Image (tube, helix red, strand yellow):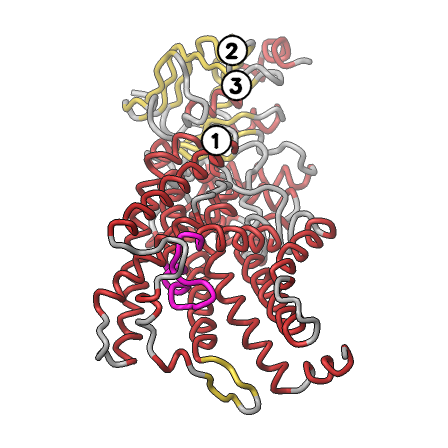
Amino acid sequence: MIVEALAEFLTLGELGGVIVNGLAKSALYVMIASGLTLIFGLMGVLNFAHGSLTMVGAYLGGLLMVVTVTGGTAPLTRLGLFFVAIVVVFALLTMLGGAIETTIIRPLYDRPPIYQILLTFGLTLVIEEVVRIVLGVYGLQPLSDWQAALATKPQFLREPVALGPVSAGWMSLFQILLGTVTVLGIWAFLTRTRYGLYIRAGSEDAEMASALGIDVRQVFTVVFALGIGLAGAAGTLLMWDPTWGASVPLAAETLLPAFIVVIVGGLGTFRGTVVAALVVGMADAVTTWWFQNAIEFTGLPELVLFLVLVVTLIVRPQGLFGVEEVGGH
Amino acid sequence: MSLLELDGVHTYYGDSHILEGVDLSVEAGEVVALAGRNGVGKTTTLRTILQLTPPREGSITFRDESLVGLETHEVAERGLGWIPEDRRMFSQLSVEENLRAAIPDPDDVRDGLRLAFDSFPILEERRGQDAGTLSGGQQQMLAIARGLVGDNDLLLVDEPSEGLAPQIVADVAEALSKASEEVTMLLVEQNLPLALDLADRFYILDKGCVVDDGETAAVTADDERFRRYLSA
């Protein structure tokens, strides 16, 4: 049976489908983790509220779509509104992130990491409770996906597309596109802008950067704000994905993979996060295929994420591209 | 009016009293050496001026403006540059990026890079290389170059020859000598010949206080005066 499955797996159509699926999963993972890696990797701040803010982004994005899209809205208009929603959610969450950093995170920089962990964990509880209350007011179920938001997705994104012998979903291609744009955007910001240079300098040696005239506190506010903005943008994308969807449990569902990707890639390296997202996404896609087509144990692919984490921590504890120490304030 | 003036400065690390009332001044155009044995507070004096370790008592003025209470980046914006003793490169940034980070005005990047590369041609050859992969001497050159390109009026230079081979020390001394024609310096240096060669005046610190000061020429005439405080 295993041999037959292997023969089937190695056909161009199946293998291509698994690769596209893996790239789509990688794109989602990189979008979920990129905000966390900026905050955790560059500032050394453990933001346990990251998943909750992704969930808030999913609901906000959903709200914008539900309010603007009607049954008669054309598919391309829906797509355009979705991009507007991503930009608006990114902007709103960036402002929220800036406010969170300046008011409650900044006073804790000189204290041990446990303070940040407890504070951001507490923030998670507050955010989730507020979201539950708001959902209750509007009669929405917090534990199940927001179907009205999911329904704003244009029909063509629900359909498959033939790429030669490979059958892939339009949604997968859309996710790969957005993931690629996100990676290129962050990479260009960090390496091609003056502010990106300040961020990299400040994260390596905050004291020296200050002595060069760089306002490191402001730099960290911007990093935190952008990280939260990215979490919100990722949430908006997940809102259209039926395997994720806008729901309160999305907070926990995204936080764990995000931490796994950041740790596997290595703390303090965006490049590591991108490669780790590819490794984890591909491992997820390959094992999903195997456990659905040959071994028939659908719960196992989720364990693969943790398996990748455990193997990485044993073989290379600092992660694929990690440095010994990160952050600095 | 002195360019920099410290008056009765007291600095602590926790409960440890490191500077116990330091008074010193630096005039525009001078190179002033701060000498003394290890652990007497020379580096702490520089860190205190930059507000990296703020003083608990005393005043620090730069061009008659108080620096006490400012953030370090605000001190730097007023024209004080720092060349720290352990170089403090941004090791994951390239040589060029290290220099760019030190140039406050984006319009000055081209001229700043030219100045750095003219001063240390080896840095131009290594401009794309990660600073962490440079040799110790090259890192020191980069640290000095970073101080030079920062549009500073006063450079606080901490042990620039520490841990360097004699030939590299000569190169560093030449670079600092050339730089001193353009910028005022407060120099901490254990290498006495280098310090005496560069400095116009000196202060000697002992146990957190200034115990002697004067023209460098007077020291060379009265060698014992220096040795009393500098011998281990």
Q: Specify the segment rendered in magenta.
A: A233-250
Chain letter of mark 1 equals A
Q: Amino acid at mark 1?
A: Tyr
**Helix, strand or loop for disc 1:** helix
Residue A194 in view in this figure: no
On residue A115, the disc is 1
Towards the viewer: B55 or A49? A49
Residue type at numbered disc 2? Asp
Q: Tell me residue A260's x, y (percent).
A: 58, 53
- Please identify the quarter of the rendering in which residue A219 is found: top left
Q: CA distance from mark 1 to mark 2?
A: 25 Å
Q: Position of residue A117 (x, y in %)?
A: 49, 36
Image mark count: 3
Where does the image place residue A78, in percent across and percent down from the top left?
A: 28, 75
Q: Chain of mark 3?
A: B
> In the depicted view, which residue is nearer to us: A227 or A236?
A236
Mark carried by residue B217: 3
Category of crowding for the residue at label 3, using alpha-carbon neighbours closer than 10 angstroms: few (below 14), some (14–19), many (at least 20): some
Of labels 3 and 2, earlier in sequence is 2
- C-alpha separation, residue under disc 3 versus residue under disc 1: 56 Å
**How packed is label 1: few (under 14 Cα within 10 Å), some, or many (20 or more)?**
some
SS class of the residue under badge 2?
A: loop
